[in-house]
Image (tube, rainbow, N blue to C red):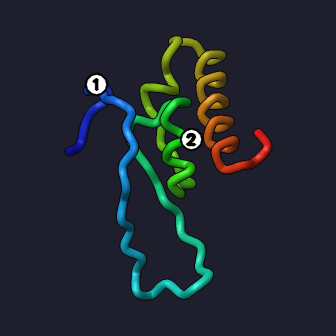
Amino acid sequence: MPTTAATPRTARTSSVAIDVPESSEPGDSIDIEVDGGITAETAPVVAQAGANVLVAGSAVFKGGKPDMYRANIAAIRNAAALARGEAA
């Protein structure tokens, strides 16, 4: 069910089935995007599940000032990178 930024969410793990288009060849690179509920706490979960495009909205704008926006984005990026085993 779609939610909005104002909808409370609880962190949970779930499995997701992905249909790869028939036109894909073995070795083709595809992006897996997750849009909604992305925070520094949820980014590692979806990154470990294979997502490589994370769309964050309200989590970015917490704090109300550009310095906080930068810090929030950095926290989400670092959390996902660490979950993928990349240097943050």
Q: Residues within 10 Å of mark 2 (few under 14, many from 20)?
A: many
| Label annotation for residue 74 | none
* Residue 76, x across and y down, in percent: 59, 33
* Left or right: 69 as drawn, with respect to 32: right
- Marks 1 and 2 in Cβ contact (< 8 Å): no
In the structure shown, which secondary structural element does the residue marked by tag 1 occupy?
loop
Q: Quadrant of the N terminus?
A: top left
To which residue does mark 2 refer? 44
To which residue does mark 1 refer? 8
Residue at 66 percent across and 50 percent down: it is 84
Front disc: 1 or 2: 2
Tally of numbered discs: 2
Kind of residue at disc 1: Pro
Q: Is residue 58 above or below residue 23?
A: above
Residue at 49 percent across and 22 percent down: it is 61
* Residue 21, x across and y down, in percent: 40, 80
Q: Is residue 68 above or below residue 60?
A: above
Kind of residue at disc 2: Pro
Which corner quadrant of the image does residue 15 belong to? bottom left
Task: Tell me how far mark 1 sits from mark 2, CA to CA.
Answer: 19 Å
* Residue 87, x across and y down, in percent: 79, 43
Residue at 23 percent across and 43 percent down: it is 2
* Residue 30, x across and y down, in percent: 54, 70
* Left or right: 21 as drawn, with respect to 79: left
Q: Is residue 6 above or below residue 80?
A: above
Q: Quadrant of the C terminus?
A: top right
Q: Is residue 71 above or below residue 46?
A: above
| Viewer-closest of 1 and 67 | 1
